[in-house]
Image (spheres, helix red, strand yellow):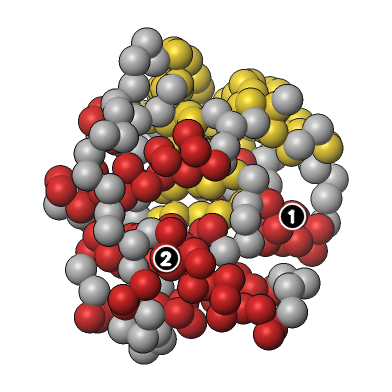
Amino acid sequence: MNIIEVKNLKKIYQDEASTTIALADISFSVSQGEFVAIMGPSGSGKSTLLHVLGLLDVSSSGSYYFAGQDITSYSSDELANLRNQKIGFVFQAFNLLARTSVLDNVKLPLVYSKIAEADWDNKARRAIEAVGLISRLQHQPSELSGGEKQRVAIARALINNPDIIFADEPTGNLDSKSGKKVMSIIQRLNEEEGKTVILITHETSTAEHAERIIHLLDGKIDSDIKVAKRLSTNDEYVK
């Protein structure tokens, strides 16, 4: 089953002085449980594509089917509801609230959910434990390393048990050791829990954790290749 299918997707930015085509006739699908990396040079359209696929922006034309439903005509409220229930985001900049504990940062998406508030702490604790940070519950972001901050972001992305995780340059601000730990967690979520993962990265070593790599160039798909053998998760897991 395809969780994502886009056909002839276009995104055009226009002002009085110029017209910029960010995406041009993008067509592809992503199966449930697949791990796809999207790569490309600066200006290739990969960030724009992430925002459209993640329902943070809308396309100028074309069709977008999410879990079999045509969402092209969805209202902003309908898109926000779908995004909250079905999608988790992990960003390069972490996007954590500075003066807020790890526990409360992870609970944030539950504010917009239908989950009873009495259950929030337990759900957040389970998500934090899954990324090996249960000892950091009451720490604030300033007290964490870069790798720990990204693991908090992953826990927050998991809190609503999403069908799909969008990871935007998740290792971009990390040293190589922390980056490997973060990618090990993301890959395990794909392999062991069946989460669909769409990864945006410019790093070949990071993309090699995926089973499929899509290269963008000038807003178009330049190549779409199945990876013969992706990197293993045999690195020591985060404790």
Query: Residue type at mark 1?
Result: Leu
Residue at (52% x, 59% y) in the render? 157
Q: Residue 58, percent across and down?
A: 68, 47
- SS class of the residue under badge 1? helix
| Residue labelled with disc 2 | 129
Up/down of 43 relative to 182, above or below: above
Image location of residue 190, percent across then percent down? 49, 37
**Closer to us: 40 or 134:** 134
In-front residue for pair 75/187:
187
The residue at the point 69 percent across, 39 percent down is 60
For label 2, the crowd category at 10 Å Cα-Cα, with few meaning under 14, some 14 to 19 and many 20 or more, is some
Q: Nearer the viewer, residue 70 or 121?
A: 121
User: Helix, strand or loop at disc 2?
Assistant: helix
29 sits to left or right of 44: right
What residue sits 37% from the left and 72% below the top? 134
Q: Which residue is mark 1?
A: 82
Label 2, label 1: how far apart the Cα atoms are: 26 Å
Q: Quadrant of the C terminus?
A: bottom left
Q: Is residue 32 above or below residue 171?
A: above
